[in-house]
Amino acid sequence: MDVAERLRLEGYRMTPQRQLVWDVLRHAESHLSAEEIHARVTEVVPDFNVASVYRTLTLLAELGLVKEVRLADDRGHWELAHADDAFHLVCRNCGDVTHHSGDLVDQVRRHLGEHHGFQAAEIDLVVRGRCAACDSPESDAPAAADPGKPAADPGEPGQAG
């Protein structure tokens, strides 16, 4: 079933604005923030309202057609919906985000049910670290700062600098 048909079944129309947002997501080669989606849409329709992007994303997410995921910078990024068995690996050094499938998410779901009595309706697994390319001995790029930690003040005692 295509997105226009799904919208019709739910009582919505495939408006030109919704089609533009959908097309950007469908053709994206990476996860995009709402602002990045807006920027791409305005390449086609310069006066496109950013609020229309947010409304469309909200509707498409409610219909299970797209997902919002928090990645390296903790901003919402959007992608086409996929099965829960896919998870994201985010390199903190180069920012690369890759999808992987396997039984890891099923193991988490099973563990939550068996050991905690919790029935997960949705699991969004994001693993942060260093990708193989950045972790190789040939890579001399310094690791990016952990976005969850404040930068150290070089003037503090005990800090190199």
Image: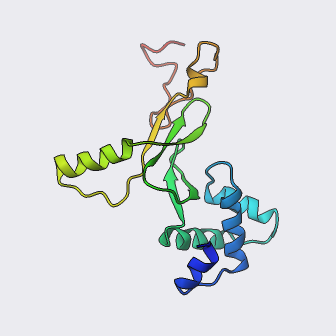
Q: Nearer the viewer, residue 12 or 9?
A: 9
From the top left corner, tell me how far across and down residue 153 is, in percent: 50, 24
Front residue (pair 17, 133): 133
Q: Is residue 72 above or below residue 118?
A: above
Q: Position of residue 74 (x, y in %)?
A: 50, 47
The residue lying toward the viewer, choosing from 83 and 95, is 83
Q: Is residue 72 above or below residue 79?
A: above
Picture coordinates of residue 93 (x, y %)? 58, 29
Determine which quarter of the picture holds residue 140: top right
Residue 149 is left or right of residue 66, and the answer is: left
Q: Residue at x 82, y 66 (%)?
A: 44
- Indicate left or right for 54 with 119 as reference: right
**Measured along the vertical axis of the image, is residue 136 above or below residue 114?**
above
Q: Quadrant of the N terminus?
A: bottom right
**Residue drawn at the location 81% of the way across and 70% of the way down:** 45
In this rendering, the answer to whether 23 lies above or below 85 is below
Q: Residue at x 48, y 72 (%)?
A: 62
